[in-house]
Amino acid sequence: MLHYSHDNMAELLRAHDINPTHQRIEIAYALFSRQEHLSADQVMAIVNDRHAETSKATVYNTLNLFLEKGLIREVIVDPSKVFYDPNTGPHHHLYEVDSGRLTDIDAFDVRIEGLPALPKGVETVGIDLIVRVKRTA
Amino acid sequence: MLHYSHDNMAELLRAHDINPTHQRIEIAYALFSRQEHLSADQVMAIVNDRHAETSKATVYNTLNLFLEKGLIREVIVDPSKVFYDPNTGPHHHLYEVDSGRLTDIDAFDVRIEGLPALPKGVETVGIDLIVRVKRTA
DNA sequence: CTAGGATTTGGACTCTGTCTAACTTCCGGA
DNA sequence: TCCGGAAGTTAGACAGAGTCCAAATCCTAG
């Protein structure tokens, strides 16, 4: 998908078994049109930029719904807030601790196979590799 | 250090340039004697087990001080609370999403060298690899 | 013993996120 | 077209982690 319109957001939602309402389309558009990692309050701010349209509860409901349906991914790097990542493919993250900027590490080639066998009765949900960096003084 | 006493906690703190007060020794002892990952409120509960001695503010102050001085490490896996890890050596984590249990992955052999070069003007603070698992149904 | 810096304290406060009960929207059937 | 119910949205109260601040306490050097 090369260009993001409200219309193909509706399609995207339907494809993920989500009823495409106004609010959901706006939130999906906010996340996918800019390919960034946004926190709930950033999504809130973007969606309500001109005139308030979407409540806090809906933003949280919707982000959690998208998460369940596998449309977005949660990135936990900052103790004070969760980021949401519209890129669900295999990749990892670079986190700038002083500015709070979170970016992707593409072209990713880390050998995860080195990992010891997992305990019995357990299956992997996801593997997060986070490289924390700071500006050199 | 094979055995953890309050006395060698005091030494440990001094070695890290921390003035060893009662409260700080108790908190260090809580973390190091059991080699576990504890959250601030767990530390609080342990330290105040018999009779209340240490305030919430002090627990947070102290954990942040230990962090600054490199005595412990912060593990961010759960959006609702931070865990503190007395093991600062190179190792990574296994997080059970349903129970909230956090354990170490020792014998660690993942090839981090595969990483692309970092952006200029930036240095690595730490690399966190977190394997999220859940119980198989 | 005393003064002053370091440390600790309770409590108010902030912030992210959840919950709830009421309200609105949408849609299918008569 | 009208009705009813299910799905979705809302404001605001609430919960829990963590911070802040001014006052009280604890060293320790002199």
Image (tube, coloured by chain):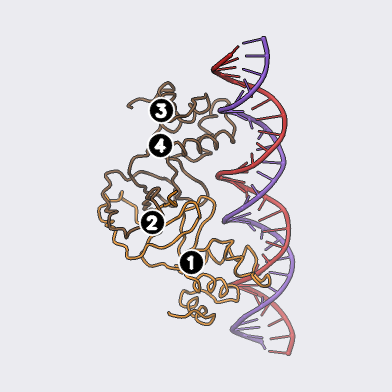
Chain colours: A orange, B brown, C purple, D red
For residue A36, which numbered disc appears in the image?
Answer: 1
Considering only order in the chain, which callout, 4 or 3, is on the residue closer to the N terminus?
A: 3
Q: Residue at x 46, y 68 (%)?
A: A86
Who is closer to the viewer here, A65 or A29?
A: A29
Q: State which chain disc 1 sits on.
A: A
**Nearer the camera: disc 1 or disc 3:** 3
Instruction: Identify the mark at residue B15; answer none if there is no mark.
Output: 3
- The three-letter code of the residue at mark 2 reads Asp
Q: Is residue B31 left or right of residue D11?
A: left
Amino acid bearing label 1: Glu
In front here: A47 or C23?
Answer: A47
Q: CA distance from mark 4 to mark 2?
A: 21 Å
Residue at the spot 31% in from the left edge and 58% down from the top edge: B115
| Number of the label disc, if any, that sits on residue B101 | none
The front one of A62 and A85 is A85
Quadrant hosting residue B90: top left
What residue is at 41 percent from the left and 67 percent from the top? A88
- Please identify, in this view, whether the residue under mark 2 or under mark 1 is nearer the observer: 1
CB contact under 8 Å: marks 2 and 1: no
Instruction: Name the residue that disc number 4 marks.
Output: B86
Counting other residues with Cα less than 10 Å from the Cα at mark 3, is it few (<14), some (14-19), or many (20 or more)?
few
- Residue position marked by numbered label 2 in the rendering: A128
Q: Earlier in the sequence, mark 2 or mark 1?
A: 1
Q: CA distance from mark 2 to mark 3?
A: 34 Å
Residue A113: which quarter of the image? bottom left
Real-space Cα separation, disc 1 to disc 3, in angstroms: 43 Å
User: From mark 3 to mark 4, how far is it between C-alphas?
Assistant: 15 Å
Q: Are marks 1 and 3 in contact (CB under 8 Å)?
A: no
